[in-house]
Image (tube, grey):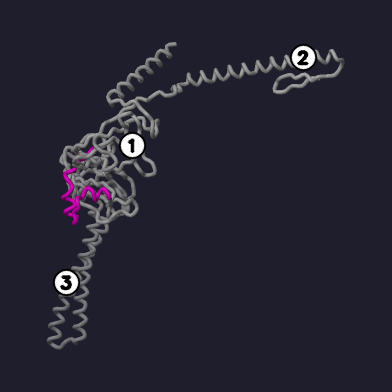
């Protein structure tokens, strides 16, 4: 009888004769020993294979020291440009609405066209309004004739009353008729003015000089006072609005008390356009909101930029650059900083290359690329510039200068590209 345990045949001992029993026992024992040796060799070989595979996949040998870039810190005076997103508005942004309803008969302007004050933009169908003006003019003529008759009757009634030909009550009736005729005349004049004004509204004109925006309606469209036909922006002076936090505002305002003082404390500001170029004119802070936005905790500021060449357009966007003079400060790249639990840390490196995870505080004002350190570091300290995600507190590294590290990375890149090209050929 036989069985199978873990893939190995084990022969049970059966009792037949004395000779058969001894022979069967010896054969079973030898088979078990051979099978066990085979399994041990197989497992050992598989372990060696896994170990070699792991080494082939790039596992670093134990004790290998990483080569990473380190920067020694110095305190210096510098000007830091703090950048803030901004949006442009014209000095006068007039949304054009017709004052009366009607069909558009003609469009006089095109998008982007410059227009003067009072220049026609749209022409509405004015047949009905011309008829109303004519009717009002006729009513005025009738009122004038009625008034002339009433005045004649009044004069005659005065003579008759003096001669006691008519009673006082009759004279009073004539006098009231004269007043009524005078009132009707004034009403007719007002109706004519209104009718003519409505007729003039059929020609939609520009209230400001500027640039025409998008023309949303063309001939044949029925429009009314609620319809926004287009927008005309006066861009000789452009208002650029940007927002900063209350903390940043207090740091930049230099302790001014009134809005006028706060505006004066800001230096002339520069503007970076959407294409990355710097606008040639400088702007002056002219307005500061007196109320902090409760939702965002920010304060909005208005900077006035002259726009003689019309380069800035209402609705455009850019970046306001606010210069900040810093004396004896330490500047570090934001890429070297590790943020955890709303705190900022860097790895400092001692003379032996040992890393220490160091907490720092920074100025609330930054340019988006660097931090100004206010505590936690001093001149002469060395910090890790790159590779912060692959190290930990207490690790030992081989410090490299930033130039040497850059050359090393470029060499590795070129080598990888060459290896890839060679593999591609095969």
State the image quarter where residue 377 is shown.
top left
Label 3 and label 2: CA atoms lie apart by: 152 Å
Q: Nearer the viewer, residue 286 or 96?
A: 286
Q: Position of residue 93 (x, y in %)?
A: 24, 49
Disc sitting over residue 346 in the figure: 1
Element on which disc 3 rests: helix
Q: Position of residue 53 (x, y in %)?
A: 51, 19
Q: Residue at x 51, y 18 (%)?
A: 52
**Residue depth check, mark 3 versus mark 2: number of the one nearer the observer:** 2
| Quadrant assignment for the N terminus | top right
Residue 232 showing in the rendered view: no
Q: Earlier in the sequence, mark 3 or mark 2?
A: 2
Seen from the viewer's position, the closer of residues 376 and 136 is 376
Residue 305: % across, % down: 18, 44
| Identity of the residue furthest to the bottom in this view | 164
Image quadrant in which the C terminus is located: top left
Q: Which residue is mark 2?
A: 26
Q: Residues within 10 Å of mark 3 (few under 14, many from 20)?
A: some
Decide which of 368, 113 is in the foreground and name it.
368
Mark 1 crowd level (few <14, some 14–19, many ≥20, 10 Å Cα): many
Q: Which residue is at the far top?
A: 426
Query: Could you tell me if the residues under marks 1 and 2 are in contact, i.e. CB atoms within 8 Å?
Result: no
User: Was residue 212 drawn as part of the magenta stretch in this picture?
Assistant: no
Q: Position of residue 42 (x, y in %)?
A: 62, 17
Q: Is residue 95 left or right of residue 26?
A: left
Q: Secondary structure at mark 1?
A: strand
**Residue range of the region highlighted in magenta in the rendering:** 247-272
């Amino acid at each position: 009888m036989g069985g199978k345990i873990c893939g190995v045949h084990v022969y049970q001992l059966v009792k037949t004769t004395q000779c058969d029993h001894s022979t069967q026992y010896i054969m079973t024992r030898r088979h078990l020993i051979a099978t066990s040796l085979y399994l041990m060799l197989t497992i050992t070989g598989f372990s060696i294979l896994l170990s070699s595979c792991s080494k082939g996949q790039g596992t670093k040998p134990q004790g290998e020291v990483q080569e990473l870039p380190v920067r020694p810190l110095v305190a210096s005076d510098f000007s830091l440009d703090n950048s803030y997103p901004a949006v442009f508005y014209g000095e006068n942004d007039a949304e054009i609405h017709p004052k009366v309803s009607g069909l558009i008969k003609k469009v006089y302007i095109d998008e982007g066209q410059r227009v003067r004050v009072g220049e026609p933009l749209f022409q509405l169908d004015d047949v009905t309004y011309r008829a109303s003006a004519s009717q009002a003019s006729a009513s005025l003529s009738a009122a004038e004739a009625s008034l002339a008759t009433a005045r004649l009757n009044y004069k005659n009634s005065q003579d008759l009353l003096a001669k006691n030909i008519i009673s006082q009550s009759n004279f009073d009736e004539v006098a009231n008729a004269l007043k009524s005729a005078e009132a009707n005349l004034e009403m007719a004049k007002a109706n004519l003015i209104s009718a003519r004004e409505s007729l003039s509204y059929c020609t939609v004109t520009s209230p400001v000089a500027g640039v025409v925006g998008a023309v949303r309606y063309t001939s044949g469209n029925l429009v009314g006072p609620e319809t926004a036909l287009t927008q005309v922006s006066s861009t000789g002076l452009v208002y650029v609005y940007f927002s900063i936090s209350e903390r940043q505002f207090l740091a930049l305002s230099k302790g001014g008390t009134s809005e006028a003082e706060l505006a004066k404390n800001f230096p002339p500001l520069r503007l970076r356009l959407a294409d990355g170029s710097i606008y040639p004119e400088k702007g002056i802070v002219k307005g500061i909101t007196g109320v902090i936005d409760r939702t965002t905790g920010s304060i909005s500021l208005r900077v006035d930029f002259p726009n003689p060449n019309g380069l800035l357009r209402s609705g455009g966007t850019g970046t306001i650059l606010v210069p900040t003079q810093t004396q004896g400060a330490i500047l570090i790249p934001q890429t070297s900083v590790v943020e955890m639990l709303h705190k900022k840390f860097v790895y400092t490196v001692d003379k032996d290359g040992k890393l220490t995870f160091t907490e720092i505080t920074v100025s609330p004002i930054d340019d988006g690329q660097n931090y100004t350190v206010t505590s936690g570091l001093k001149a002469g300290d060395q910090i890790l510039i790159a590779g912060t995600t692959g190290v930990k507190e207490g690790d030992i590294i081989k410090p490299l200068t930033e130039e040497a590290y850059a050359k090393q990375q470029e060499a590795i890149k070129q080598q990888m590209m060459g290896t890839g090209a060679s593999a591609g050929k095969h």
